[in-house]
Image (cartoon, rainbow, N blue to C red):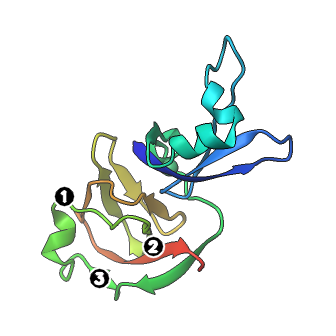
Amino acid sequence: MKRKIIGYHQDRKQDWVADLDCFHGQHVRHEPPFFNRPWSATAEGRAGKLGETLNCVRCDALAFPEGLVEYKRTPEFTQDTIPKGLLKHHTTKMGTWGRIHVLEGKLLYSPEGQESITVLPTKTASIPPEMLHSVAADDAVRFYVAFYTLQT
Ligand SMILES: [Zn+2]
């Protein structure tokens, strides 16, 4: 999934890492001939790439970023009270990660372009910001969704 570069930091080895608007980081090494990114070696070069996009494979893997805090959660829903909007394709807003918590039963979670996931009480499922998805209950379920962002 394409994500915007919103800043940079250096890792422990002093390699440059782009901060993406999904809160994942991605190395932007200049190591020819494997990685040809001369722009990453200078402050001007890095500044020039702010706002451009990189493909974030960690979002595609639904990997929940570190350092986020919960700021809101939905009420508990059951198979009978799931809001219609959740059954259709929808997204969280930019900068908001969701996490599906199933308390009882199971919920089918379908991120667009990916295989559907059966969410069980033993494991939460992550919803990356702005990724189209829907949920479905074929069976009895009780669940809620919590929303996370960076602590400010
Ligand atoms: Zn990402």
Q: Amino acid at mark 2?
A: His
- Give the vertical position of 145 relative to 6 (above or below): below
> Label 3 belongs to which residue?
77
At a point 15% along the width and 62% down the height, the residue shown is 88
Report which residue position mark 2 lands on: 101
Chain-order first, disc 2 or disc 1: 1
Q: Residue 135 in the image: state x and y as whole percent.
A: 26, 62
Q: Is residue 23 left or right of residue 127?
A: right
3D distance between C-alphas at marks 2 and 3: 11 Å
Dot 3 falls on a residue whose secondary structure is: strand
> Which quadrant of the rendered structure holds the C terminus?
bottom right
**Pointer 1 residue:** 89
Which numbered disc covers residue 49? none
Q: Distance of mark 2 from mark 1, alpha carbons?
A: 19 Å
Kind of residue indicated by mark 3: Phe
Between 121 and 135, the residue placed more toward the observer is 135
The residue depicted at 38 percent of the width and 55 percent of the height is 118
Identify the amino acid type marked 1.
His
Q: Label 2's element?
A: strand
Residue lying at 22% horizontally and 62% vertically, measured from the top left: 90
Tell me: 65 left or right of 21: right
Horizontal side, residue 125 vs residue 24: left or right: left
The residue lying at 64 percent from left, 20 percent from top is 35
Dot 3, how many residues are within 10 Å of its Cα: few (below 14), some (14-19), or many (20+)? some
Say which of marks 3 and 1 sits in front: 1
